[in-house]
Image (cartoon, rainbow, N blue to C red):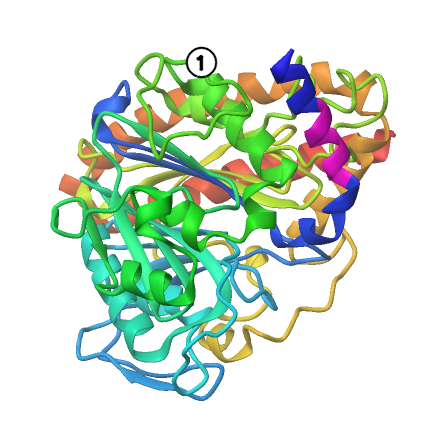
Amino acid sequence: MKTKLFLLSLLLWISAYSQAQSQFNCYTIAAGKNATATGNVMLAHNEDDHGKNYLNIHKTKAGKSKYYKLKNGGKFSSAVTQLPALWIEMPGQEFADVFINDAGVMIVSNACPSREDKPELTDGGIGWMLRQITGRHATSARDAVLLAGKLINRFGYASSGRTYTFADQHDIWVMSVVNGKHWIAQRVPDDEIMIIANYYTIQQVNLKDSLNFMGSPDLISYAEKRGWYHPDKDGAFNFRSVYGKPESLAHIGNIARQWQGIKLLSEKSYPVQEKFPFSFKPKHKLTLSDLMRVLENHYEGNEFDDSRYYRCGNPHDGGINSICSDINQFSIVTEFRNDIPHDMGSLCHIAFRRPCIQPYVPFFTGVDAFPDNFSYIPVSKSLSNHFNKAPYESPDSIHLFPLYVTYAKEVDASYATRIDAIRSQKLKRENAYKKRTEIFIDTYRELKKTDPAKASNLLNTYTPNILDEIRKGMKRQLMNN
């Protein structure tokens, strides 16, 4: 009875908080190496952004130490050489990009609004450039936290709040930043997984445990000074409750997505009204497919499914935003494998626009470049032009991303009648790509010994060939409908 009443209350909150929903973008799953079937760290992320967007994919080159000019006027110089990195860019967006550098460090983020209303900022603070700097210079997930913390301590964070996830072959660190100069980071246990929607997930804090926590030394005393935390009355300090924006913590769009991911992956069942843990043990050792199936989920089969298994329309138009939603721009799952040649980089799998209808395509971050038709402008000009939103073009443009957007709209128009066939074909392709990739890894390993140049060329053309197959398939389907 209590659960039903709680669910009714949540559904009534939808209209009350609909205006705030635009803040709640992205979804992340992080799995420690001992929580996966292969023994490798895995990081999965849906990038959600409003409006018409381009998705640019660049491979940056190694560079000398860099002088950075921040958007709001601040300046930062790094004495460390820039690392090559795969940069998945959303031009015009303040906080959307993903980086995976050649040291094997990956960076994703989720908007997590804070209650801070008097932020301390120096030289205008830092925002989007934080990921650019850490993505080009960090040599490990822990190093990324230290560098990001240094930047926040110096400039202050120029946005309400955000949670960054930094992963490498060994560790995953979750770093929650607050508007201004306060932050906290926690390491994900090796045998557990964690999920982030769009509210802070770090709860208990122990800065004396430097192996698992880093953060601002005055995190608790500042909260006491602001009147947000009273030790005698509130008990143990809980970062999530103390620093999180109440509307974000109570929002159905966060609670439902968090609960659904935990429901699908956790060994323990949690009622929807319960306060979920920072991380949890999985019901079984997780595979790439397990994470992919969560990222493409629309609450099928439970009370949050507004489409009633698509009988009431497509699942992206519901009042409660689902994990795979109308604003999803791309979905990525990375496995930090230690059994492939180092120069192949990390093995990623990406689905453009909607993961529920697009197969996850494998690609290696060790490539020298990504296909030209996934870059609106050359990488050399992208940094200076990042905040200039690209003019949106037709699906027949050179840039391929508009074709994925058009195809998603076409499928949404008749989702219920088409999704079974599309899903079946999607899963067949994903399984075929996995087998194909393992054969390719063996071929590359052997060819590298005898003809490195030919091996490099194969690496650079592997993913473009698959993408070309998909492009042709989408074109055929659009012409036949």
Q: Does residue 85 appear anywhere in the picture? A: yes
> Mainly helix, strand or loop, the magenta region?
helix
**Residue at x 18%, y 31% (from the top left corner):** 339
Which residue is disc 1 drawn over?
Answer: 269
Q: Position of residue 427 (x, y in %)?
A: 55, 18
Secondary structure, mark 1, is: loop
Q: Position of residue 355 (x, y in %)?
A: 59, 33
Q: Position of residue 192 (x, y in %)?
A: 28, 27
Q: Is residue 346 above or below residue 388?
A: above
Relative to the observer, which residue lies in front, 154 or 38?
154
Lateral position of residue 480 relative to residue 76, left or right: right
Question: Does the magenta-highlighted stretch encompass residue 9?
Answer: yes
Q: Position of residue 285 (x, y in %)?
A: 30, 16
Q: How many marks?
A: 1
Q: Is residue 364 above or below residue 322?
A: below
Q: Is residue 393 above or below residue 70?
A: above
**Residue at x 59%, y 22% (from the top left corner):** 426
Q: Is residue 474 above or below residue 19?
A: above
**Residue at x 62%, y 16% (from the top left corner):** 2
Q: Quadrant of residue 320?
A: top right
Range of residues picked out in magenta: 8-14
Lateral position of residue 54 relative to residue 103, left or right: right
